[in-house]
Image (cartoon, helix red, strand yellow):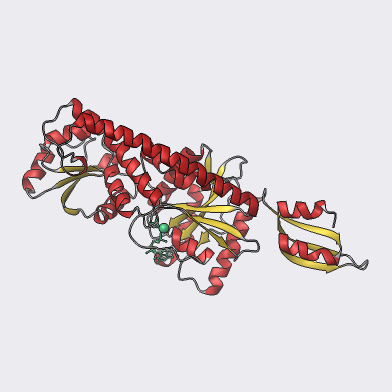
Amino acid sequence: MRTILLGSKHDVYPGLIEEVKELSKESGLLLIAERWFSSRPHPRYYVPKELLEELMEENPSCEALLIPSELSVNQYNKLAVLVEEKVEIIDRVNLLLQVFEKRAVSWESKIETELAKLKYLRPRLQASLKYSLKKERAGFFSTGEMEKEELIRDVKKRVQLLERKLKRRHEIVKKQIRQRAQQQEIPLIPILGFYSTGKTTLFNQLTGNNQPTGEEPFVTMAAKIGRSVLFPLPLDFADTVGITLLPVEILESFRITFEPILYEGIAIITLDLSRSENRIIEEVSLVKRNIQYITGEKVGVETQNKGEFTLIPVFTKADLCETPFNKSRDVLETISDRSSRSRDDNEPLVFTHSFEEMAFNKFVSSLFETLQPFLSSRIVETELQDIEPKNLSAFYDAGHVKKVTYEENGLVSISGVFYRNKLDKILAKRY
Ligand SMILES: Nc1nc2c(ncn2[C@@H]2O[C@H](COP(=O)(O)OP(=O)(O)OP(=O)(O)O)[C@@H](O)[C@H]2O)c(=O)[nH]1
Ligand SMILES: [Mg+2]
């Protein structure tokens, strides 16, 4: 679809322009003109009227107008009247929804996307009814012969139905994941981050999975759990759907993909080193905002405050950055909420999919060292004495025995990292 991109410089945040271009390519829009105006967005039409008229005249073949920000319902409708409904108006949210729709394959992601789309559509339909527009809109708004009132009623019913379906499914998923966690006593660490930051690539390497990856935005549309046996103790990871700026009501439709797996109070956040420093920092704040909305907890980066959700940054695509360590250190200094971080404090976690085996092993052990203090309610590093040698195997099952020392009295002392629950069970038997 031949499209004019028209945005306000006032609404630009780091990464927005790249994002809009990536998304528009993905949803099949062909940008034939692009203009960023320096005035503030017009309260009524968002865009300056004269500029729009000029662009439409210059580009008579234009089929769609892409506004890279979120338009209010009023702006959407007024703008539609202004272009006499000849071209489709696509704002940032609408654009995102089109990409989601294209990507959604699972039952769950299809329902989530449909719900988000209907929630987006409903107020706009209601408003357009108020303005009693004569003609039906093209594309997203095309309603065929159906009366608008009837359509609004249908939309409302459908929203209620989908919400009920998702809620039921949400409860089941949540219960299954919690039960699994309780039975297995293994922490689940979600890998969060913006789309295309290498979440799935990292997940696959850690867990031996082979989930699809790709340069296009939103390749992953549902969470996936996998176990890693690369660490001293087994750990579970969850690959997740990419995050971006979304209005709250749309984000709500995707709650089910995030909320059930965010119970551990800790997650990895992948930060793509090939992106600009400003963009990475902006992404961190948007991810924090989304997690805060979903969990209701305060979110920090490497925060050591109890009761706060903590994000552990992993810098990805180091091979695409000339100075990965300097860049990641600089970013970390800005984003970290940790009170005691100094330059020579532990190094940033830097990853690339093209790591040699040694570099990857080093990354895995640094990742474990970084995660361990945050999993202290689950994992304990300790030394134990006076253990009967015949009982040693139980400790091997409970975790990673690093050192065994045989005492003169025939008993042994050990040191290692263990799952707290498993260790407590052994110790309760007084070995
Ligand atoms: N050069 C390079 N490319 C990478 C690296 N990690 C991932 N990629 C590529 O970056 C693209 C995105 O990677 P994914 O793992 O699919 O990213 P994602 O965060 O899961 O993306 P979504 O599922 O779309 O949210 C893919 O084409 C990967 O092959 C890396 O370390 N170096
Ligand atoms: Mg992915």
Residue 422 x %, y %: 72, 54
Which image quadrant: the C terminus?
Answer: bottom right
Q: Nearer the viewer, residue 275 or 405?
A: 405
Residue 16 x %, y %: 31, 48
Q: Quadrant of ligand 1?
A: bottom left
In the picture provided, is 128 more to the left or to the right than 282?
A: left
Determine the residue positioned at 17% across, 26% down. 131
Quadrant housing residue 360: bottom right
Q: Nearer the viewer, residue 212 or 24?
A: 212
Q: How many marks?
A: 0
Determine the residue positioned at 80% across, 67% down. 404
In the picture provided, is 113 more to the left or to the right than 184?
A: left
Q: Vertical placement of 357 versus 287: above or below?
A: below
Residue 185 makes an appearance in the image: no
Q: Nearer the viewer, residue 243 or 300?
A: 243
Residue 362 x %, y %: 58, 68
Q: Vertical placement of 318 versus 149: above or below?
A: below
Determine the residue positioned at 45% across, 68% down. 353
In the picture provided, is 151 more to the left or to the right than 292?
A: left
Quadrant housing residue 115: top left
Residue 50 makes an appearance in the image: yes
Q: Vertical placement of 404 versus 199: above or below?
A: below
Residue 94 x %, y %: 27, 43
- The single residue placed furthest to the top in the displayed view is 130
Q: Nearer the viewer, residue 257 or 25?
A: 257
Q: Vertical placement of 71 versus 409: above or below?
A: above
